[in-house]
Amino acid sequence: RAVADVLRALPKPFDGAVLIVQHVSVAFVKGYAEWLAGETGARVALAQDGQALRAGDVLVASEERHMTLAADGRIAFTDHGVAGAQSQVHKPSVDELFASLALHAQPGVAVLLTGMGRDGADGLLRLRNAGWHTIAQDNATSVVWGMPGEAARVGAASEVLAVGDIAAAITRKLR
């Protein structure tokens, strides 16, 4: 629901690409993408290996491998990412996506939403250190404050915001 809340509140058309890593089984990811599209009015699709990013894309990690951004700016799925062994627990790993963005993308905005564990905290810190604006969802609006809470604890978040304030912050920073 948090992802849908943020997507729904983004301007349409959105002048950027949105990459989503969700810890769900590959058997459910197609239905999840369809649900997001229906809930938000956004064009949500499953990311494909080798796919080039375009403004307006909303792409969901579609494999039980890490979704990363390659040096050529295309989506790449891999079993071994760049973030290190700690992030290998989850496939796909948010840390792996964030680490690849820190290496291969121009600074933008990265968001870490509600979830168990600490996946995403180290990658969000890499992005912040690489000049990105980083946002973690706050405790009050998180179902589980594990991932965003860890990001806040390690100083990875430029801002810690209620889920309802995140889309406005993204829009403001991208202007």
Image (cartoon, rainbow, N blue to C red):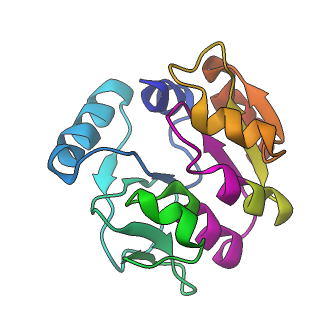
Instruction: Examine the rendered structure and indicate whether residue 68 appears above or below residue 57.
Output: below
Residue name at image x 48 percent, y 71 percent: 68
Magenta highlight on residue 116: yes
Residue 139, percent across and down?
67, 19
Instruction: Examine the rendered structure and indicate whether residue 100 appears above or below residue 10.
Output: below
Which portion, as a residue range, is magenta?
96-124
Residue 167, percent across and down?
63, 31
- Where, quadrant-wise, is the C terminus in this rendering? top right
* Front-lying residue, 26 or 90: 90
Residue name at image x 79 percent, y 48 percent: 156
In terms of image quadrants, where is residue 24? top left
On the rendered structure, is 39 left or right of 109? left
On the rendered structure, is 64 left or right of 57? left
* Front-lying residue, 124 or 37: 124
Residue name at image x 61 percent, y 41 percent: 112
Residue name at image x 50 percent, y 19 percent: 143
* Front-lying residue, 39 or 22: 22
Return the residue found at the far top: 140
In terms of image quadrants, where is residue 46? bottom left
Magenta highlight on residue 91: no
In terms of image quadrants, where is residue 138? top right
Residue 141 shows in the view: yes
Residue 17, percent across and down?
53, 56
On the rendered structure, is 94 left or right of 57? right
Return the residue found at the far bottom: 72
Residue 151, percent across and down?
72, 42
